Image: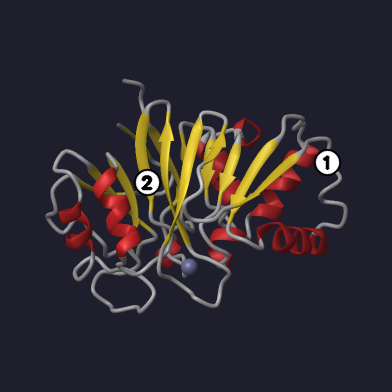
Amino acid sequence: MSELELTFVGTGNAFAPDGLCWNGFVANGRYLFEAPPSALMALHRAGIDPNALDGVIISHHHGDHFLGLPSLILHWKYNGRERPVTIVGPPGTVQLARSIGEAVYPGLFEGRFEIQWVEAAPGECIQLGQLEIEPVEVAHDTRLSLNLGYACRLDGRRFAYTGDTSLCDGVLDLARTNEVLVSECASRDNYIPIHMNLVDDIPHVRAAMARDATLILTHLTPDVDDYGLERTIVARDLKSYRF
Ligand SMILES: [Zn+2]
């Protein structure tokens, strides 16, 4: 069985508490999940060449998940990228990325490489090179176009990512069917309506998973721990985990 490696470019929630980088991770060095504002800095610090990325997969349009895109594209434009890159996100991603990117860096999209945009909808199957992803609708900010989690297959391994969400059927479906689940856990015991917390929600997520599956918590406050749950890891900034 081939190895699955997840490297966290950040593990903090929207407030970057205590200096945690905003949440995002890279699968097998090639696929970046989320484009937080600190993504480019964190990729460099983690020793991942941004030009080695084949794709960026965004769950929803909140700034801590999306606003790092202009810096990534700027890097690619001026640091030798020639290979195409695929950017996946909810409906409206192309228009939003283009309007913000062009406003903050005029000419940003005049690079030598092609951006292949994919606006994802639940029930589709999207192929990015070796990565196959299936978007799942989750329950987060209904004022945004759509909030997505993703079920993924990469090099024969199955993992999933919840995106930002409260506890919902989409999360439990991802929990039941994957060997590794990267789950948001936005606080320890504070009730935040559009998020999950460690004490009230995460035990239900863990209980839905197979016993030999691994749960990784991210989008954190620093007081989140494993709460004694089996096969549960609290992700750390710039750390890699192999399965
Ligand atoms: Zn959010």
Residue position marked by numbered label 1 in the rendering = 111
Instruction: Name the quadrant containing residue 159.
Output: top left
Inter-mark Cα distance, 1 to 2: 32 Å
Q: Write the residue at 57% across / 50% down.
A: 39
Q: Residue at x 74, y 62 (%)?
A: 95
Crowding near pointer 2: few (<14 within 10 Å), some, many (20+)? many
- Left or right: residue 179 versus residue 90 is left
Residue tagged by mark 2?
A: 160
Task: Give whichever of 107, 120 is nearer the camera.
Answer: 120
**72 or 169: which is nearer to us?**
169
Q: Identify the element where label 1 is drawn.
A: loop
In this view, the residue farthest toward the front is 123
| Res 30 quadrant in image | top right
- 179 sits left or right of 149 in the view: left
Q: In the image, what residue type sits under mark 2?
A: Ala
Q: Position of residue 232 (x, y in %)?
A: 21, 48
For the C terminus, which image quadrant?
top left
Is label 2 in a helix, a strand or a loop?
strand
Answer yes or no: is residue 25 visible. no
- Which of the image's four quarters has the N terminus? top left
